[in-house]
Amino acid sequence: MDVIKKIKKQLKKNIIVLYMKGSPEYPSCGFSARAVQALSSCTSKFFYVDVLKDTDIRLALPKYSKWPTFPQLWINERLIGGCDIILELLNNGELLNLVKNCQHNIKLK
């Protein structure tokens, strides 16, 4: 499958997607760990992709999203941002609102 089609399929199938290094249980970088911690404080229902295990996505997603780094949080097929933005949204209450507004639509793989 074409990697961009794969990314689009993941985003369409899953309301909340975190592209990260490692897994939520074992993040492989501090930025991914902080992003998981912030997102997990709002919901436990999100899909993640370990970009260290999927080289094609790791190389293609920054071009597709026009966002150069990981993690990347997507909600409703829209890029929210990376670690700093996720933490800012958590601190001002917007992350919880974003998650609550889509909570009833979450589909997990």
Image (spheres, rainbow, N blue to C red):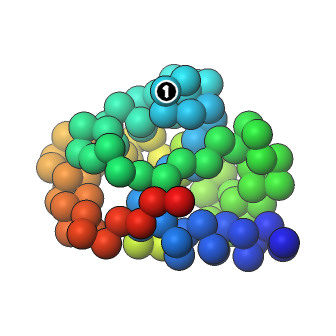
Between 30 and 102, the residue placed more toward the observer is 102
Q: Is residue 5 left or right of residue 49?
A: right
Residue 81, visible in the rendered structure: no
Image quadrant holding the N terminus, namely bottom right
State the SS at label 1.
Answer: loop
Q: Would you identify the image quadrant in which residue 22 lies?
A: top right
Which residue lies at the image location 83% right of the left edge and 55% below the top edge?
56
Q: Position of residue 92 (x, y in %)?
A: 16, 47
Q: Position of residue 18 (x, y in %)?
A: 50, 50
Residue assigned mark 1: 25
Which residue lies at the image location 69% right of the left edge and 60% below the top edge?
61
Q: Position of residue 78 (x, y in %)?
A: 46, 71
Residue 106, visible in the rendered structure: yes
Between 65 and 37, the residue placed more toward the observer is 37
Which residue lies at the image location 45% right of the left edge and 60% below the top edge?
108
Q: Position of residue 54 (x, y in %)?
A: 77, 47
From the viewer's perspective, is residue 53 above or below residue 18? Answer: above
Which residue lies at the image location 77% right of the left edge and 60% below the top edge?
60
As shown in the figure, which amino acid type bears the numbered disc 1? Glu
Q: Would you identify the image quadrant in which residue 23 lies?
A: top right
From the viewer's perspective, is residue 95 above or below residue 29? Answer: below
Q: Is residue 77 left or right of residue 61?
A: left
From the viewer's perspective, is residue 94 above or below residue 71? Answer: below
Report crowding for label 1: few under 14, some 14 to 19, many 20 or more residues within 10 A (C-alpha): few
